Image: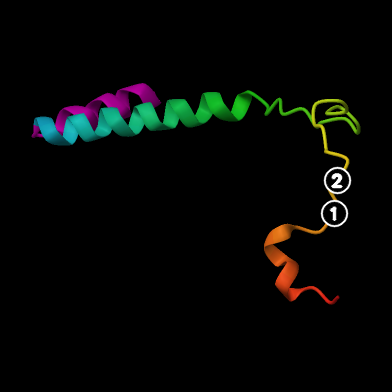
Amino acid sequence: MKEQIILSKIYMLSSDSLRSELIDYLDFLLTKQFSEKQPNKKRKPKFGCAKGKFIISDDFDAPLDDFKEYMPE
């Protein structure tokens, strides 16, 4: 019954541009419907998962030469 109503209203559209807009909107609704059914599978990173991937030099906390004039003597 609902399909007949939909088809009759589609046939009432006189211009091809309106029918094209309707097709675009239907595509949008279908995309929205399928994206809602698939849950987001984002994994949370575990604590320590990047261990060993970054190396900090031994003089990391040493004062920078560029700022010597601003540092107290």
User: Which SS class for mark 2?
Assistant: loop
Residue at (33, 34) in percent of width and height: 25
Image quarter where the N terminus lies is: top left
Could you give the CA–CA distance between mark 1 and mark 2, rounded to whole angstroms? 5 Å
Q: x%, y% of residue 66?
A: 67, 61
Q: Estimate the x, y position of residue 57 in percent, counting from the top left.
A: 83, 38
Indicate the secondary structure of the residue bearing disc 1: loop
**Residue 30: mark:** none
Q: Is 61 located above or below residue 28 in the figure?
A: below
Q: Nearer the viewer, residue 29 or 70?
A: 70
- In the image: residue 1, left or right of residue 33: left
Judge by depth and name the residue closer to the eye, 40 or 13: 40
Q: Nearer the viewer, residue 68 or 39?
A: 68
> Could you tell me if the residues under marks 1 and 2 are in contact, i.e. CB atoms within 8 Å?
yes
Left or right of 46 in this view: 37: left
Name the spot of residue 60 as percent of width and height, x first: 83, 47
Which residue is identified by label 1?
62
Residue 70 percent location from the top left of the image: 73, 75
In the image as oriented, which residue stretches furthest toward the front?
73
Could you tell me which residue is drawn at 53 percent across and 23 percent down? 34
Amino acid carrying label 1: it is Ala
Disc number at residue 59? 2
Q: Main secondary structure of the magenta part?
A: helix
Q: Is residue 56 found inside the magenta-colored segment of the image?
A: no
Q: Give the extent of the magenta segment.
A: 1-15
